[in-house]
Amino acid sequence: MKINAILITVIAIVLTGCGKPKSIDVGKTVKSITTGDTTITLSSATGEIKNGENELMLSFADKSGKTADVRAASLRFHMPAMGSMAEMSDAATLTTTETSGIFRARVSIESPGTWEAMISFQRTGGTEQATMSVNAK
């Protein structure tokens, strides 16, 4: 009898842990762009990118709005040379999440202003690229 109670308790714990995957809070949208059948969204807790250290989320969705199966991605911020200011390029460090197609990004933006967010991502059909203009405050 005692073994049955323990077995039932263990089964209940296992089944509770096997439910739906926990949803990831991607924060507020900074900018979205659609390329082909994929929508790419860059977001942060505040909906902004700032000069200095940033923690961002990079999400990929298919045309139905479901998270796209993206195996790998990269994100780099680029600002061309202007006057006496040299060209700047800041690469983000991406880490995967428990959901395919959603990545955490850490990047240090050197200067406020308009940056080109250059995104490269790998899907079953190959590697794709997209660029979106964003402002750092």
Image (tube, grey):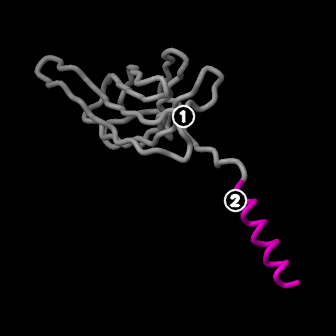
The vertical placement of 93 against 112, above or below, is below
Mark 2–mark 1 Cα distance, whole angstroms, equals 28 Å
For this rendering, which residue is in front, 6 or 136? 6
Q: Is residue 80 above or below residue 60?
A: above
Q: Amino acid at mark 2?
A: Gly
Nearest the eye: 133 or 129? 129
Residue span colored magenta? 1-18
Residue 26, image x, y percentages: 54, 39
Please give left or right for residue 14 compared with residue 48 in the image: right
Q: Quadrant of the N terminus?
A: bottom right
> Is residue 5 magenta-colored?
yes
Say what secondary structure mark 2 lies in.
helix
Secondary structure under tag 1 reads strand
Q: Residue at x 42, y 29 (%)?
A: 121
Q: Residue 28, which numbered label? A: 1
The quadrant in which residue 95 appears is: top left
Looking at marks 2 and 1 on the same chain, the residue that comes earlier in the sequence is marked by 2
| Residue position marked by numbered label 2 in the rendering | 17
Q: Are marks 2 and 1 in contact (CB under 8 Å)?
A: no
At a point 70% along the width and 55% down the height, the residue shown is: 18
